[in-house]
Amino acid sequence: MLIRIALKNLLGARLRTILNVFVTSFSFFIILLMSGMYDGMLQHAKNVTIDTEIAGGAYWHPNYDPLDPMSFEDAHAIIPNEIKLLVDQKKAFPVLVSQASIYPGGRIMPAILKGIPPDQNIVNMPTQSLNGFNDGTIPVLIGKGMARNTKLKVGDSFTIRWLDVNQTYDANEGTVVYIMDTENFKLDMGHIWVPLDIAQSMLAMEEQATYVTYKTGLKEVNNKGDWIIRDVNYLVQDMEAIIEADKPGAQIMFMILLALAAMGIFNAQVLSIFRRGKEIGTLMALGMTRLRVVMLFTLEGGLNAVFSATATLIIFGPVLLYFGVNGIPLPLDYTEMGLIMAKRLIPVYSIGLILSTTILVSIIVLIVSYMPSRKISHMKPTDALRGKAIA
């Protein structure tokens, strides 16, 4: 019976109910969209990183720290036998990392030189372009961002200088054989890629590597020496940290939207109780307990949340679906800011996100509906019938 009365009262309020439902459903929509965008950013970053860089994970030399170029000098060794067996079976490939200096157009620029097997097919990189080049210079693969910063084009030559294992500086000419277009800035900015055997020869580090990337689905080897295994979760934690650092700004906007929706419902409840004093008194005089009257007004607020969820599905559902399929075009290239982001960001709406948002908004709506309604418990039926305001 309470639900029927509450529903009738809400439908009778018309414009007030419509405004409350619309504001609350708009809050639903923005929270779902923004949260879906962050989840989509993280999912896209993980997918691109796995596809182009880490595959199933990697074994690192114990001294290797990709964020500290000074560690590269000591971060190399002969690959342990069990890991080398994976390489021989084409289930993994080694990479040798070193610092270098390049001189494009007479300018000096620091670079990270990485040697990689041209025939690897574990990660999505055009390393095959390093094959079949034999003009006496070092074949070099670079990314679009690196090409833009160095003003290099395919076929351009430049000087590469490096420090080998004997602490001797050497230099040679490199030629750009391919410019890759990749969303993973970690393969692009400041990197030059050369064939592994040439890198090992340049650095006098025969049969040595800095890390070994392996295929997805492989188990950890039993005897990996002092090399350290790094799984996918570890290797994408920098992306997760960047995205998490950006979330507080969005959460402030969520709170503002929820506060606006809650304020509208709170004001509507206060006004409703004030204007419907005689109705409240009549219900009490007819035998309805104060608790049931409080429940009635709280239920009216709760139904606002139900109507809002339905309105979100009907009004904003197609918009969410459209963005989820076609993505949201981004005006900037965020790769230079250290983010792996597509030019069209596709939000991801998980079941957990939808349920948690619905529960959160519903709880807030119920609380702000109950707060003014509890004043009814202090009313006397005779005062309500006379139209006296609630204290």
Image (cartoon, helix red, strand yellow):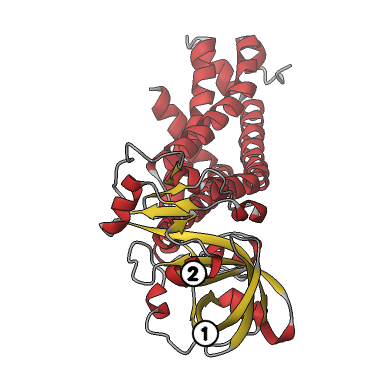
Q: Which residue is drawn at the image coordinates 55% and 65% (left, top)?
A: 203
Residue wearing tag 1: 137
Is residue 94 among the parts visible in the rendering?
A: yes
Work out whether residue 302 or residue 147 is closer to the camera in this orientation and state it.
147
What amino acid is found at the position of numbered circle 2 in the picture?
Answer: Ser
Residue wearing tag 2: 201
Q: Of circles 2 and 1, which is in front?
A: 2
Is residue 49 among the parts visible in the rendering?
A: no
| Side (left or right) of 85 relative to 277 | left
* Residue 100 x/y as whole percent: 64, 68
Vertical position of residue 253 compared to residue 300: above or below: below
Q: Which mark is residue 96?
A: none
Vertical position of residue 140 compared to residue 169: above or below: below
Quadrant in which the N terminus is drawn? top left
What amino acid is found at the position of numbered circle 1 in the picture?
Answer: Thr
Vertical position of residue 301 compared to residue 387: above or below: below
Q: CA distance from mark 2 to mark 1?
A: 13 Å
Rendering quarter of residue 324: bottom left
Q: Which residue is drawn at the image coordinates 67% and 83% (left, top)?
A: 104
Callout 2: SS: helix
